[in-house]
Image (cartoon, grey):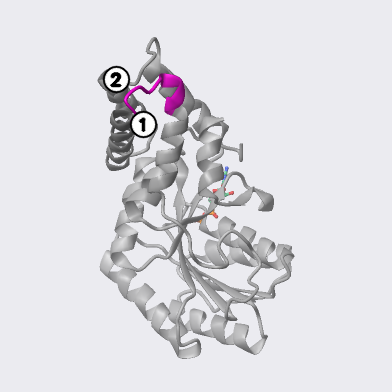
Amino acid sequence: DQGLEKTKDNFLSKITKAVAGKTTVDDEVLDNLEDALITADVGVDTTLEIVDRVQKRVAKDKYVTTSDLNRLLQEEIEEILPDVTEANFGTFDLGAVKKPYVLLVVGVNGVGKTTTIGKLAARYKAAGNKVVLGAADTFRAAAVDQLTIWSERVGVPIVKQPMGSDPASVAFDTVQSAVAKNADIAIIDTAGRLHNKVHLMDELNKIKRVIEKVVPDGPSDVLLVLDGSTGQNALEQAKQFTEATDVSSLAITKLDGTAKGGVVLAIAHQLNIPVRYIGVGERVEDLMIFNKHEFVDSLFS
Ligand code: GDP
């Protein structure tokens, strides 16, 4: 169940209520289902798409019982989530991927960015990769300190500069160091100041440009970290971030202890960016590789 108990309980009980006393899926059930999904944080647009698809299948198959509904829903939800094509999705094994793999991590403060980076460093290292961390959030002393603690705990080198240094310069040093050390992966933390979108955009673009000076293709992956426990706010934040910069994958944290995990469906669907990881706790092993089939399955069983 991946630590998603609260989300699952919320999701299932709402769907169960939507079909209570009904044997076939009629317009009233579809209406109830719409309310159920919206209140389970699946988001309006995503809910409408799901219900529309279910409605079409019900019309096509003529007689559909409410006991068929969960299976049907599960299939349609999976269908609308983006597919993943990169070879290294679903694994910490970088295998045939070009080295160093440059992972740029973006997101607003407090969402669990540093923790996610620490967990990633541990998991990539455990999978046999040589890891280098880069502390390019030079605006917060706490961010550099936290990342330093993770680098010591995991036993991987960290590249940092004094507070207030140019983040792009730290990113440049990190990738250069990764190349010099023949590292497999460089994981770079950045500052996420969303209150000034133009500034954020300029800063991230500058970081990408200097990375390109070392590795011509630029970052291999721009991972946006979002706090799943904030529900629809996480969706809004994701929309704003993707307007400011190109994001290629998502990590959604703090899904343990929240009933709002339905937002994962809304975010993945509406942004059409694959979710790569989910955070379900504070331990290293609480960072899970996201698998859409397993995730959707865990909402229903
Ligand atoms: P940052 O400001 O984005 O770097 O956030 P941090 O990494 O410092 O995390 C903020 C808080 O959230 C810390 O107390 C973390 O331990 C906690 N946290 C991060 N990820 C998770 C998660 O998946 N589940 C839970 N329960 N807590 C988390």
Residue 66 lies in the magenta-colored region: yes
Q: In the image, is the residue at mark 1 within 8 Å of ligand 1 by its beta carbon?
A: no
N-term mark: 2 or 1: 2
Q: In terms of image quadrants, where is residue 198?
A: bottom left
The mark tally for this picture is: 2
Visible residue check, residue 124: yes
The residue at the far top in this view is 21
Determine crowd level at label 2: few under 14, some 14-19, many 20+ residues with C-alpha closer than 10 A: some
Q: Which amino acid does label 2 sit on?
A: Asp
The residue positioned 50% from the left and 33% from the top of the image is 7
User: Mark 2 and 1 residues: CB-CB less than 8 Å, in contact?
Assistant: no
Residue 260 is situated, as x and y percent measured from the top left of the image, at 44, 36
Magenta region: 61-69
| Residue linked to disc 2 | 26
Of residues 293 and 275, the one nearer the viewer is 293
Visible residue check, residue 254: no
| Residue linked to disc 1 | 37
246 up-or-down from 4: above or below: below
**Element at label 2:** loop
Placement of the C terminus among the 4 image quadrants: top right
155 up-or-down from 175: above or below: above
Determine crowd level at label 1: few under 14, some 14-19, many 20+ residues with C-alpha closer than 10 A: many
Q: In this view, does 253 lie to the left or right of 241?
A: right
